[in-house]
Amino acid sequence: MAITVRCSTLKSIRIDVALICCAAAAATVVSPAGYGHAFGQRYDLPLPFALYLIGAGAAVLLSFIVIALLLRTDTRAKRYPTLDLTRLRGLRWITKSGIVSIVRCASVGLYVLVLVSGFYGNESPFKNLAPTFVWVIWWVGIVFIVALIGNVWRLLNPWLVIIDWTERGYRHLTKRNLYVNLRLPANTGVWPAVILFLGFAWMELVWSHSDHPSSLATVIVIYSAFTWLGMILFGREQWLRRGEVFSVVFGLLSRFSLTEVRVVNTQVCQGCPPDIRPAIQEDCVNCYDGFARAGASVRQLNLRPWAVGLLIQKPIHVSMMIFTLMLLSTVSFDGILETPLWQGIVEWILSAPFLRSLLLSVRTIGVDLSTFIKSVALIVVPILFLMVYLFFCRLMSLAASRQSNTLVIARLFAFSLVPIALAYHFAHYLSYLLLAGQMIIPLSSDPLGLGWNLFGTNPYRLRIDVVSARMVWYTAVTAIVLGHIIAVYLAHVTALKWFKSPRVAFYSQIPMLVLMVGYTVISLWILSQPVVES
Amino acid sequence: MQDRVLVISSVSIWVYPVWVLIALLLCNVGVSVAQPAGSESFDFTIQKRSIVGDVKTIRVTQGSQVVVRWNSDEATVLHVHGYDLKIEVKPGAVAEMRFEAHATGRYPVTSHGFGEKSGGHGHHGTLLYIEIYPN
């Protein structure tokens, strides 16, 4: 009884907050900026055709070399080499809680600043901290850090920090648990995050008001309320692993990174539901809750080679496979939206006679046609991606003499495609981060766009010569080729461990190699296209 | 001890190419190209809000002096993104813009309001792309 009362009180507070914010947002003036991509200009020169060919050729050639080298590998389960940073005396301070608390406070401070800027600052996206911080520094920048260095989002997540403080305060005041801990069905996996990610991708790629400060702030508030509600109802860790979409995305990407958090005693992680338990052998890797609860002698903060975190022993849950494929397809879709090919497709759709009546009825409802077409594409592209992927998984299953069925193969190899998407993200966004990211310099002095000059950096003239076209090209091609061979390596090692027989593993990888070469070539092709704004 | 050597060597194999890339990148930050590559000039006429002759992209070399002369049937303000140049074009008069192509890239030229005065960022579509290639 008490639980239901608490739920409805909390729920009504949350709904009130959301409604107030929506009303506030509706009262503001709306001016769409009209950029196809989320926010910010890009001035990249298309990759020259010669480099595109060299990149594609190198990808294919090096794939064969990697496979040849791996054919002689010992297939017995061996743990990748790690170096425990906490055992190094000079680095003990990392785990000291003082540093962690300061970082978490700073993160919450930034979160509040973004909201304040969004609601009370200048309406122009270029004079307000919120759009630049969210779309350039946070969404693009954190992906880089999380994928290369480690899952810092676990430390920085403002929703986690705030609910943690709230929970401690609540327990201190009422001596009761804040979390209701309702049980989710056994096979929920990460489906909530899948749906939320689709929503986020829509906001990033399609929504024309994504760079409008108060709209952005409103959405952040709504998401915050939803996240806290999810955490309170289903338990903090359960929601973070299943429904907090950014924890799931950054958790997935951080599998590529150099660092991991490990508990050398699986008893701690036995309580983890099987549909989201990290599919690793004996130890518990990147289970932060387990890490926090475990004793100091079994905890490790390890340095490890890149990409080995993407190696799995058992097939992942279907929802996690879908999530991964959606992430990969939206990364490519983002690039495709800026190509002349997409422009051509839109023009064809707009002039096709058999679509005329549909488009007219859409327009009369009041929906912008460009938004409508992009929204449909946002659903169609991941489905196409999934179909192509499943087709190749079927080929792999046939090549392996049907030792495993298509879905098992699909769930086993989805992670091995991640390095290609990461490499493309790196190639596509490096110059963007260095150019649009410079806007943070004047915005830090004047986050609300009211004419302040806190650090003396306002006004600031954007330096467009900060990185030359040649460096961008060479970095891009190198990154993509490296990403490709890492992906081939991951798929091969996974196959060797799964199929036991090296011959079967080799045959199963032939379709995978074709898929990966195709994916890499598409990524290179996108980079070789001139950027056009719709 | 064996393990440590193994870790360090396997990590360095992955890390080495990245360090090479970062070093190359850093070498290039802030470097300005000193060679003057001559002067390139273009003339464009805007009619009915697009360029006559359906030219979409012009290519120049880094370091050259670029001169673009504009003619339009409607009054407008043109904006070269990136270089952040603005020029007002009035019907009947030729407006000339000059700049040194010191930075490589692909820069859109957009119009801010045809016929009426328009400040802010309500740009009405790209008229032209200026591509500056490294020399």
Image: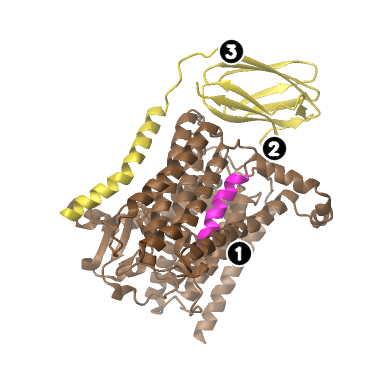
Chain colours: A brown, B yellow
Q: Give residue A341's position: percent from left, percent from top.
A: 66, 42
Question: Considering the numbered disc 1 on the image, is that residue within a helix, a strand or a loop?
Answer: helix
In this view of the protein, which residue sits in the foreground, A167 or A350? A350
Question: Considering the numbered disc 3 on the image, is that residue within a helix, a strand or a loop?
Answer: strand
Chain letter of disc 2? B
Q: Tags 2 and 3 in contact by the CB under 8 Å rule? A: no
At 75% from the left and 50% from the top, the residue drawn is: A369
Q: Give residue A43's position: percent from left, percent from top.
A: 56, 33
At 40% from the left and 69% from the top, the residue drawn is: A314
Q: Residue B122 carries which label?
A: 2
- For disc 1, the marked residue is A18
Magenta region: A323-337
Is residue A330 in the magenta section?
A: yes
Callout in the foreground (2, 3): 3
Q: Which mark is residue B39?
A: 3
Report the amino acid beneath label 3.
Ser
* Separation of marks 2 and 1 at Cα, in angstroms: 30 Å
* Separation of marks 3 and 1 at Cα, in angstroms: 58 Å
At 61% from the left and 45% from the top, the residue drawn is: A336
Q: Tags 2 and 1 in contact by the CB under 8 Å rule? A: no
Chain letter of disc 3? B
In this view of the protein, which residue sits in the foreground, A160 or B107? B107
Rendered position, B18 above or below A244: above
Q: Give residue B19's position: percent from left, percent from top.
A: 33, 38
Crowding at mark 2 (Cα within 10 Å: few <14, some 14-19, many 20+): some
Is residue A445 in the magenta section?
A: no
The outermost residue toward the bottom is: A1
Question: Considering the numbered disc 2 on the image, is that residue within a helix, a strand or a loop?
Answer: loop
Q: Residue A235 carries which label?
A: none
